[in-house]
Amino acid sequence: METTNLNTPIVIFDGECNLCNGVVDKLTRTIPNERVNWVPFQSSIGQHLLRENGLSTTEMDSVILFEGDTFSKDSDAFFKLIAQVPQFKWTALACLSIPRGIRDGIYKVFARNRVAWFGKSQSCSLGW
């Protein structure tokens, strides 16, 4: 299993999705490494965390943010991550005040279509 700091929030993302890789690439340039661990869905640690928390290990349909003993997914996880970027913090926090059903509906349209719209990569941009 790959190693990561389990005391730091962990983000599980689709390491083969071009959109996901692009967003993670931008966020890793902005959010200090000691504040977030980026873990591809396809990695052994990603699979282990998903299995351990009763989440799908065969289909990736949302970014997942693990913080301690809890996790967030869909728009909650996305906007919590975006809030870590200083210039987007207040916008992300304002978006979290929008009813979850509306936020998640929009998020899920992108999640369902991300590979069709942005393509798929054979490898993760972070080198996993």
Image (tube, rainbow, N blue to C red):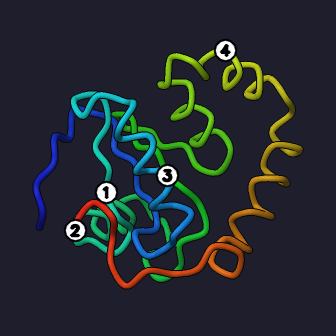
Mark 2 → mark 1, Cα distance in angstroms? 8 Å
- Say which element carries label 4: helix
Total numbered labels placed on residues in the image: 4
Three-letter residue code for mark 4: Trp
Q: Which residue is mark 2?
A: 128
How far is disc 3 from disc 4 in space, using C-alphas? 21 Å
Tag 3, which secondary structure? Answer: strand
Mark 4 burial class by Cα count in 10 Å: few <14, some 14-19, many 20+ = some
| Residue 25, percent from left and from top | 40, 50
State the CA–CA distance, disc 2 to disc 3: 17 Å
User: Which label's residue is closer to the chain start, 2 or 4?
Assistant: 4
Q: Tell which circle, 4 or 1, labels the residue nearer the N-terminal end.
A: 1
Q: Are marks 2 and 1 in contact (CB under 8 Å)?
A: yes
Q: Gap between marks 2 and 4, in whole Å?
A: 32 Å
Residue that carries the numbered disc 1 in the rendered image? 39
**For residue 31, which quarter of the picture?**
top left
What residue is pinned by disc 3?
A: 64
State whether residue 124 is above or below residue 73: below
Q: Who's the residue at 57% across and 18% down the image? A: 87
Badge number at residue 90: 4
Q: Residue at x 58, y 80 (%)?
A: 119
Give the mark nearer the N terminus: 3 vs 1: 1
Is 85 left, or right, of 43 in this rendering? right
